[in-house]
Image (cartoon, helix red, strand yellow):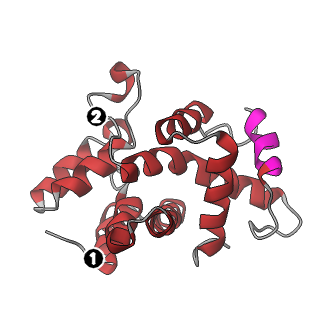
Amino acid sequence: MDLTYEQAYALLREYNEGEFHLHHGKVVGDVMRWFAEQLGYGGEADFWQCVGLLHDLDFEKYPDEHCVKSQEIMRERGLDERLIRATASHGWAEDAERHGELPKPEHQMEKVLYATDELTGLIGAVALMRPSKSCDDMEVKSVKKKFKDRKFAAGCDRDIILRGAEMLGWDLDRLIGQTILAMRASPNVD
């Protein structure tokens, strides 16, 4: 079953009440839509956006089963296996013991989600420190400076961001620069 954005957002709200998680889902969804259009997948932009929107579906209610419980929820509803796989793949890591047996990102969409999920949080945190409180005037070097300071936005896993850039075959500057542009285009980024 294919989902509209509205149906995907309703599902997200069913399992998430906190404004942080709802906002994060919208931002990552917008970022995924932007990347779909930029990377030649414009015909799948709605799907990419739903993947981004639902990637943390289970995180608020089932943090210990993150990326596992969401698969169960989505399968019970008869959702597209591509959606289920893509959302679960963002939890993949080389440390399978910590993350369970989750699919490794393989499709370009899965790699983009893997690379940008944590990065959107870091960029958002950098934006809050700026006088403008915005991404509109942000430069890559500002994000890289904070990227190196692991105490800043400590919850954002830099190793995942680096691994995601490597999966995409991009350097860190390109990934950060493109994600800043994607966030600038999002109506959900303040």
Q: Residue at x 71, y 54 (%)?
A: 125
| In-image side of 125 versus 47 (left or right) | right
| In-image side of 76 versus 116 (left or right) | left
Q: Residue at x 57, y 74 (%)?
A: 188
**In front here: 127 or 112?**
112
Q: Which residue is mark 2?
A: 102
Q: Which quadrant of the figure has residue 161?
A: top right
Q: Is residue 147 found inside the magenta-colored segment of the image?
A: yes
Q: Residues within 10 Å of mark 2 (few under 14, many from 20)?
A: some
- Residue 59 disc label: none
Cβ–Cβ under 8 Å for marks 2 and 1: no
Q: Which quadrant of the figure has residue 44?
A: bottom left
Badge 2 marks a residue whose secondary structure is loop
Q: Which residues are magenta?
A: 141-148
- In this rendering, is residue 32 above or below 175? below
- In this rendering, is residue 150 above or below 50? above
**Which quadrant is home to the N terminus?**
bottom left
Badge 1 marks a residue whose secondary structure is helix
**In front here: 133 or 49?**
49
Q: Position of residue 136 (x, y in %)?
A: 76, 70
Q: Which residue is mark 1?
A: 7
Q: Residue at x 37, y 34 (%)?
A: 92
